[in-house]
Image: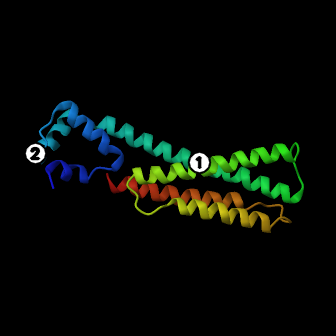
Amino acid sequence: MSDLEKFLENIPPYLKEYYTKKIEEDKVDTNDLRHLKRHFEKKNLASEIKEIKHKMSVDTTMNLVLIVMGAYLFISFVRNFMLGNFMVNAYVNGIVGIVGLVVCGYELYKEKKLYRLCGGEKPIVIVNMIAVLVGLLVSTNTLDSPIDFSLIILLMGLILTKLSYLSLFKKYE
């Protein structure tokens, strides 16, 4: 294992590309691990790295919020369709429900990529998928109830996933 590989081993996956690009730009000698560390300490790249980490945090949060929003739109469509209550008519509600499902599916796919990029090994996307399915089941089984618990279940999935991301971010600090 070379010194460069040892150096990059303790860096989050989403920063490895940044570091390798800087090493190529500055033509740093990659044979000496101490020289690599000193080079990056001298450059004082902490502000740029902090900005990248903040961007990753914002991306993950927005992704999770869009998953909850899309899933809730779809669950609300299914619930209202079963009850026969429509905001405008069944077609407009159907279009909104399908758009919500597509947004949720796309964001779940994107979350899987983001989680791998952050260094996660276990697929945390399963937590959100289970939250969507349980929310759908609860919503359709409690049609008589005036309270809809599906949003609470989706938010619990969001919180669990966000805690998983936070533990990943702390792992590399």
Query: At numbered mark 1, what does the secondary structure look like: helix, strand or loop?
Result: helix
Circle 1: is it few (<14), some (14-19), or many (20+) Cα within 10 Å?
some
Q: Could you tell me residue 69's position as x and y percent?
A: 66, 48
19 lies above or below 123: above
- Tag 2: amino acid: Asn
Rounded to the nearest angstrom, the CA distance separating label 1 from label 2 is 42 Å
The residue indicated by pointer 2 is 31
- Tag 1: amino acid: Tyr
Query: At numbered mark 2, what does the secondary structure look like: helix, strand or loop?
Result: loop
Locate the N terminus and report the quarter of the image it occupies.
bottom left
Residue 143, image quadrant: bottom right
Sequence order check, earlier mark of 1 and 2: 2
Q: Residue at x 73, y 52 (%)?
A: 74
Mark 1–mark 2 CB contact (< 8 Å): no
Is 31 positioned to the left or the right of 77 in the image? left
The residue indicated by pointer 1 is 106
Circle 2: is it few (<14), some (14-19), or many (20+) Cα within 10 Å?
few
Is 128 positioned to the left or the right of 21 in the image? right
Q: Could you tell me residue 151's position as x and y percent?
A: 69, 57
